[in-house]
Image: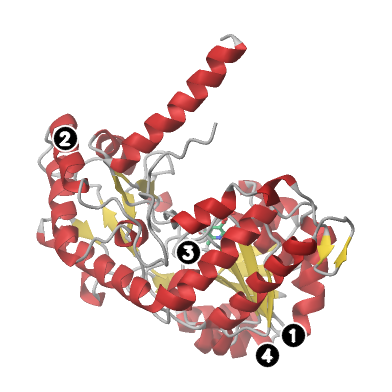
């Protein structure tokens, strides 16, 4: 392609992506859509600047306004999570984790957490899987045992194993995360063995902020790491909340340890997202959880094997379906995508035992953060469950369903739970 052709083609692809998302049902549990104000902040001049160091002690000039914005973001983060200290510099959840590992452990130490198949994240994984904790920071990993029926950490077995292993760090949280983890029950055991306790709230930070999940910093976690773009509807960025005792080591691990440029436009966008969460977060996240439970029940009523029916399917934004009766997660993910229903395949905890791997796992994972943000409620969850049944069980033509999905989506184009919403959620903004 010639330069101008590539230039035009790229811009055209962006617009087509926006068009597609206007008419699709976005159910990826790790995603969300930001408010117009957050998007405005993301294209401001901060994205051209550097501000290494701490507000007021920068290595660069030109930070007069950047400093004030970063202080607002830190203040709001502390208020929203009732935390003693906030660091808003990690550029993602993964880098927030790496900073926390760096502050709390040395290479060669042992960390206990969930395996990826049991809901852990690749950033917590072993060296042999290329995980950040193992391959980058050199931690040895021992797994917290999972009660597969309850899709949660097995408290008694975990307490026993923590006492035997005596790890340096116990990390709670994960990516396949239906129910609050037993932080309160296990923190004391961990600390009695000399371990630090950390909680990876990448997925559930928004739910925690809205008071709809657990409250790790009150339950024994000393450090909570977050992505700021999953249930917390901010920019793609990261954040760390911690006790004041750990503030200095966390700050040093982040800078100069993990970031040089900390993406100042994202810090500004985060400040706005945090302000909107303080104002609307409770209402928004309560609806996310109601929608997740409703979606779980509706899919179950349609005949799908939704996990944990006896526990109400979920207490978070996530619902998981075992699709092995109808094929595999990979094939169904693609078919659903052809029907404008966007979700992801997911390993089920017992998949490795049964010979399935991440390309063709036994599950699909759905999240309700983004559809809730678009104004959908319980009755729309029933509609979505029907669309999914028609693809997964009835094997209908995806193209036919896609057209109906696009029609269904027409009414839900604005972002809710924010101060101002003049621009549509997926409006393409042209400033050339
Ligand atoms: C998404 C996720 C991360 C990584 O977050 P990024 O912001 O994508 O880097 C870390 N931990 C868990 C549990 C996650 O789900």
Kindly identify which numbered label has been placed on residue 83.
none
| Gap in angstroms between the C-alphas marked 2 and 3 | 31 Å
Which labelled disc corresponds to residue 203? 3
Residue 37 vs 170, above or below: the answer is above
Q: Distance between the residues labelled 4 and 2?
A: 58 Å
Q: Residue at x 54, y 56 (%)?
A: 235
Q: Mark 4 points at which residue?
A: 192
The quarter of the displayed image where residue 21 is located? top left
- Find residue 37 and report its horizontal and vertical position in percent: 49, 58
Instruction: State which quarter of the image contains the N terminus.
Output: top right
Of 135 and 282, which appears nearest the observer?
282
* Mark 2 or 3, nearer chain start: 3
Image coordinates for residue 309, horizontal then vertical, percent: 21, 70
Q: In what quadrant does ligand 1 lie? A: bottom right
For mark 1, what is the residue? 244
* Image mark count: 4
- Indicate which disc, 3 or 1, sits on the residue closer to the N terminus: 3
Look at the numbered disc 4 and give the secondary structure of its residue.
helix
The extreme top residue here reads 2
């Amino acid at each position: 392609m010639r330069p101008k052709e590539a230039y035009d083609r790229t811009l055209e692809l962006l617009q087509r992506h926006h068009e597609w998302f206007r008419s699709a049902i976005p159910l990826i549990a790790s995603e969300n859509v930001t408010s117009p104000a957050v998007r405005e902040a993301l294209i401001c001049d901060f994205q051209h600047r550097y501000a290494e160091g701490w507000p007021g002690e920068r290595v660069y000039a030109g930070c007069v306004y950047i400093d004030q914005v970063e202080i607002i973001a830190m203040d709001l983060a502390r208020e929203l999570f009732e935390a003693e200290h906030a660091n808003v510099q990690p550029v993602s959840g993964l880098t927030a984790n790496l900073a926390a590992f760096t502050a709390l452990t040395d290479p060669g130490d042992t960390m206990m957490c969930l395996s990826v198949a049991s809901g852990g994240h690749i950033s917590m994984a072993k060296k042999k899987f290329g995980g950040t904790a193992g391959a980058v920071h050199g931690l040895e990993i021992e797994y917290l045992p999972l009660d597969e029926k309850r899709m949660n950490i097995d408290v008694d077995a975990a307490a026993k194993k923590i006492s035997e292993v005596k790890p340096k760090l116990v990390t709670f949280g994960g990516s396949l995360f239906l129910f609050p983890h037993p932080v309160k029950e296990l923190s004391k055991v961990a600390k009695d063995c000399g371990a630090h306790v950390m909680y990876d709230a990448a997925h559930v930070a928004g739910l925690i902020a809205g008071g709809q999940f657990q409250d790790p910093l009150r339950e024994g976690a000393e450090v909570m790491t977050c992505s700021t773009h999953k249930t917390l509807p901010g920019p793609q960025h990261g954040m760390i909340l911690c006790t004041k005792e750990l503030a200095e080591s966390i700050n040093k691990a982040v800078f100069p340890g993990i970031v040089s440029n900390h993406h100042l436009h994202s810090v500004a966008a985060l400040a706005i997202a945090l302000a909107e969460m303080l104002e609307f977060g409770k209402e928004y996240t309560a609806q996310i959880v109601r929608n997740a439970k409703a979606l779980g029940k509706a899919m179950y009523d349609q005949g799908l094997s939704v996990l944990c029916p006896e526990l109400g399917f979920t207490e978070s934004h996530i619902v998981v379906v075992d699709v092995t009766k109808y094929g595999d997660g990979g094939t169904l993910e693609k078919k659903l995508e052809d029907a404008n229903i966007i979700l992801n395949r997911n390993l089920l905890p017992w998949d490795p035992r049964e010979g399935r791997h991440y390309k063709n796992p036994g599950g699909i994972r759905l999240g309700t953060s983004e559809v809730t943000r678009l104004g959908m409620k319980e009755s729309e969850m029933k509609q979505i469950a029907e669309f999914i049944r028609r693809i997964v069980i009835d094997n209908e033509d995806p193209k036919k369903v896609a057209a109906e999905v696009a029609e269904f989506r027409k009414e839900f184009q604005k972002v809710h739970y924010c101060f101002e919403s003049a621009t549509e959620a997926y409006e393409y903004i042209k400033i050339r």
